[in-house]
Image (tube, helix red, strand yellow):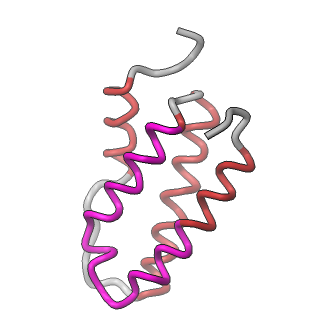
Amino acid sequence: MGGIEPPSRCLKIFNYVLRPQPFDISITNQIMFVNSYFERITEIVLSKQYNIRLGFNFLLEKIEKTALLKSTIEIKVIKEISKNIGTMKAKSKTPL
């Protein structure tokens, strides 16, 4: 298996990292919150060699469905997410 986790295990971990959070948080806190998710997921992906493409796709889908992006700060948060994906791609040893 070469250290690659089965998809179901990968999804469970990303789901845990993205568990529901309070809706009444400021823009700054929301962006910091998204950044902390990406830092944690970067650690998970790089240390365990998860299926990175599956992880990114699931992560983006999950974040898009949360209340985090259902407000006027959607564009700012998406920009932060995009920056973090770039960082994760740069740190990754495998192509995305």
Tell me residue 86's x, y (percent). Answer: 66, 58
The percent position of residue 95, horizontal first and vertical second, equals 67, 36
Q: For residue 55: magenta?
A: yes
In terms of depth relative to the viewer, which is nearer, 4 or 22?
4
Q: Which residue is drawn at 52% across and 66% down?
A: 81
In-image side of 92 versus 17 (left or right): right
Residue 93, above or below 41 = above
Q: In the image, what residue occupies the spot 34% across and 36% down?
A: 11
**Dominant secondary structure of the residues highlighted in magenta in the image:** helix
Location of the C terminus by quadrant is top right
Decide: is 72 above or below 69: below
Farthest residue toward the top? 1
At horizontal 49% and vertical 83% (from top left) the residue drawn is: 76
Tell me if residue 76 is in the magenta stretch. yes
Vertical arrangement, residue 29 with respect to residue 16, above or below: below
**Could you say where residue 83 lies in the image, as x and y percent from the top left?**
63, 67
Which picture quadrant has residue 3? top right
Task: Give x and y (percent) for residue 33.
Answer: 46, 70
Which residues lie in the magenta part?
53-81
The structure residue drawn at horizontal position 65% and vertical position 51%, both measured from the top left corner, is 88
Residue 36 as seen in the image, left or right of residue 13 = right
Looking at the picture, tell me which residue is in the foreground, 73 or 24.
73
